[in-house]
Image (spheres, grey):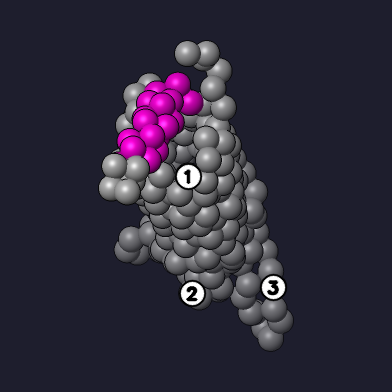
Amino acid sequence: MRWSISCASVVVAALGVPQAAADRYEATVTLRPIAAMGRVTEDVSSRTPGAPLARSTYGGGGEISVSYGLRNWLDVGAELVGAELTTATYASTTVAVEGNDAMGRLTRRARFAQLRGGPTFRFGVSWIPTVHLGLGVGARLPTAATLRYEDFGRTFELVPDGMTATISLDVVANVRVGFEHRFDRRWTVGLVAEAMHAIGVSEPPLDVVSGGISLSYTWYPVIR
């Protein structure tokens, strides 16, 4: 009986070895819907004394990535990311409207799209902790800002100077940790948590933390 159990264990282990070794040759596409929290900064230091104003806001989006296994423990890949955050409100600020200072409540919504790439380190076969490091470029697409203020008993909503809907470039760095479970040689599901920092070429920095689920499909373009 013990001999039979030992033989079965050897067979299972032998079957598992090719699957683990195949990580080196895998191509994988992954979808990740995410929920996010961002720290959005509006640079008003040139219009008011002190530092730029920052607010925390929530949102969500998604990521799609393609990767290839160079080693059993190392993948390299690229990903497209897009997300939108809810409207950030700055209760009291002074901005320029048609060249004149106006004080009121400023609101604006942040959106971004990014192309990133980098290595993913894998630490398992069936249950797989992962760590991903990424660098890339992005486009930030904030909506037009709205300044709401009152004057002579009337309420006005205007777009401040230089705060129309626009597109600006970012340099992006991110780190992501995950924990995945492989159901078979094709399908993997998992949970991820991520932190991203974007340095704007013409905008203040943007920081986003996010989390979600991942669903991966794997195939083998190289025949062994």
Q: Amino acid at mark 2?
A: Ser
Alpha-carbon span between mark 1 and mark 2: 51 Å
Residue under numbered circle 1: 182
Which mark, residue 15? none
Q: Amino acid at mark 1?
A: Arg
Inspect the magenta stretch and tell me whether residue 15 lies in it: yes
Q: Residues within 10 Å of mark 2 (few under 14, many from 20)?
A: some
Verify CB contact (< 8 Å) between mark 1 and mark 3. Answer: no
From the image, state whether disc 1 or disc 3 is nearer to you: 1
Camera-side residue of 9 and 137: 9
Numbered disc 3: secondary structure: strand
- State which tag comes first along the sequence, 1 or 3: 3
Q: Amino acid at mark 3?
A: Phe
In this rendering, the count of numbered labels is 3
Stretch in magenta? 6-26
- State which tag comes first along the sequence, 3 or 2: 2
At 47% from the left and 33% from the top, the residue drawn is 116
At 34% from the left and 43% from the top, the residue drawn is 4
Residue under numbered circle 2: 92
Q: Quadrant of residue 110?
A: bottom right
Most frequent secondary structure within the magenta stretch: helix
